[in-house]
């Protein structure tokens, strides 16, 4: 039974997780034009920088413990498998940013600055994996709403006169530098699915890959104990060991 | 080693999927049909529609170059057959050829098609053994198309009207 659980955990880590992240990498750059043609945008250089900052955040927030994922205590096959998963995570992060980053114009740079500023500030904050996940959910969610709902709504052709007026005012205020490319509504749905998949993938990443799930639950419960209860627990464990 | 098979499966699946993603981004398919066609080409299972190809060839020999090109485009939608691309380029050449002047736009499209044909034959020069043609290799056709697009004093030579279409 225990062996079965370990096999399932390994399968999810070495097969499911890389496939989830690679799917994010595939869909993150996908756009659908109004004439229903696909366009695949490779990650711009700025998104690679953001992904590198995010990777550093994963390590600092202990969402990924590098020494547990890679090292001489694992065999070659395990190390290769883990390295591929981490590489897939890096490219998924870059493409998740690509998915919510406007393609060109002033907005591209405004969003890029917003992301870089947030990621840079986060480097100096204290994070645990749960807080980090929540923070990333909010970051990507905000960018998604801005790009795929507000901006897409304002730049969509047709619609009511109030919407067109708002679009014109917005364009005028930015001195015509917004330059939002027209895309089909399907692009927003693809982006939503991509981000959801990315967050699910992150939730599946275990800080220490070989650690059983029950241990993590116990550790989480233990972190909520008060000082007296912790001392009692420690004494009980030492008593059992002796 | 525990779960070695799972790790090996994971590595293989990841590499294959990553390769497919790189291929999609490199080839930029615009529709699902492009994806399936491209996959067939990559797997070596792609075949030109021979019936359409033969129809196009007979149209070409009768001088209906535009119609022939249309049929060849439909016979080779993935533009992955060197011989078909050679004939498309030849059809552009023949349609664009004129005794007094050559049509630059058609010659330009012909050059694109012959470049595709050359790119599809990396092993060696493409030779088409058709008695109706006066140029049998893609290299000759490319040179002729390039020559037709060049501007020189020789263009003003009245003897040029005696040149024959190849």
Image (cartoon, coloured by chain):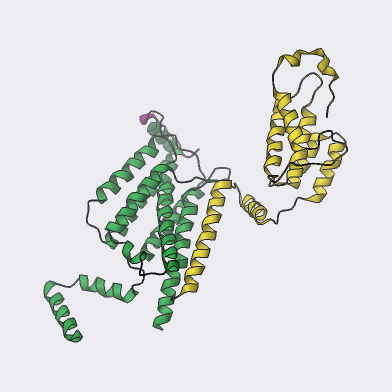
Query: Does the magenta portion include B8?
Result: no
Q: Quadrant of residue A8?
A: bottom left
User: Please, what is the dominant secondary structure of the magenta stretch?
Assistant: loop
Side of A167 relative to B155 (left or right): left
Q: Residue A212, position in %: x, y?
A: 34, 75
Tint applied to chain A in the drawing: green
Is residue A210 at least partly visible in the picture?
A: yes
Side of B81 relative to A223 (left or right): right
Q: State which quarter of the image contains the C terminus of chain A.
A: bottom left
Is residue A149 at least partly visible in the picture?
A: no
Q: Residue A99, position in %: x, y?
A: 44, 48
Side of B135 relative to B112 (left or right): right
Identify by letter the chain in yellow. Answer: B
Q: Quadrant of residue A180?
A: top left
Q: Residue B70, position in %: x, y?
A: 76, 40
Closest to the observer, A190 or A208: A208
Residue B63 vs B129, above or below: the answer is above
Residue A36 vs A18, above or below: the answer is above
Query: Which residue is located at x 36 percent, y 67 percent?
Result: A72
Q: Which residues are magenta?
A: A172-182
Q: State which quarter of the image contains the N terminus of chain A.
A: bottom left
Q: Residue A187, position in %: x, y?
A: 49, 48
């Amino acid at each position: 039974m225990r062996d079965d659980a370990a096999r399932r955990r390994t399968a999810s880590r070495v097969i499911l997780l890389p496939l989830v992240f690679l799917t994010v990498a595939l869909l993150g750059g996908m756009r659908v034009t109004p004439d229903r043609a696909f366009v695949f945008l490779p990650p711009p250089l700025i998104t690679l920088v953001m992904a590198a900052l995010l990777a550093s955040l994963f390590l600092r927030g202990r969402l990924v413990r590098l020494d547990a994922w890679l090292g001489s205590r694992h065999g070659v096959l395990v190390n290769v498998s883990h390295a591929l998963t981490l590489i897939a995570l890096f490219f998924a992060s870059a493409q998740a940013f690509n998915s919510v980053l406007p393609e060109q114009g002033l907005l591209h740079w405004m969003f890029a600055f917003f992301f870089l500023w947030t990621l840079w500030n986060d480097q100096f904050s204290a994070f645990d994996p749960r807080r980090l996940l929540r923070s990333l959910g909010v970051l990507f969610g905000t960018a998604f709403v801005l790009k795929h709902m507000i901006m897409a709504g304002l730049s969509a052709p047709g619609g009511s006169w109030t919407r067109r007026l708002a679009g014109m005012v917005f364009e005028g205020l930015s001195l015509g530098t917004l330059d939002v490319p027209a895309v089909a509504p399907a692009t927003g749905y693809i982006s939503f699915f991509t981000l959801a998949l990315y967050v699910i993938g992150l939730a599946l990443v275990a800080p220490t890959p070989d650690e059983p799930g029950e241990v993590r639950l116990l550790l989480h419960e233990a972190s909520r104990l008060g000082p007296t209860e912790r001392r009692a627990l420690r004494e009980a464990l030492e008593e059992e060991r002796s | 080693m525990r779960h070695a098979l799972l790790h090996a499966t994971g590595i293989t699946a990841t590499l294959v999927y990553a390769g497919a993603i790189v291929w999609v981004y490199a080839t930029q398919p615009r529709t699902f049909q492009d994806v399936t066609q491209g996959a067939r080409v990559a797997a070596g299972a792609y075949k030109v529609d021979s019936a359409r190809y033969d129809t196009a060839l007979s149209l070409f020999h009768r001088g209906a170059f535009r119609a022939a090109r249309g049929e060849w485009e439909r016979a080779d939608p993935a533009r992955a057959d060197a011989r078909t691309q050679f004939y498309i380029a030849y059809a552009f050449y023949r349609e664009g050829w004129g005794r007094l002047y050559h049509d630059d736009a058609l010659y330009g499209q012909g050059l694109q098609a012959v470049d595709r044909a050359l790119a599809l034959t990396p092993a060696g020069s493409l030779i088409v053994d058709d008695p109706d043609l006066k140029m049998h290799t893609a290299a000759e056709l490319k040179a002729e198309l390039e020559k037709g697009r060049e501007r020189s004093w020789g263009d003003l030579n009245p003897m040029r009207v005696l040149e024959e279409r190849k």
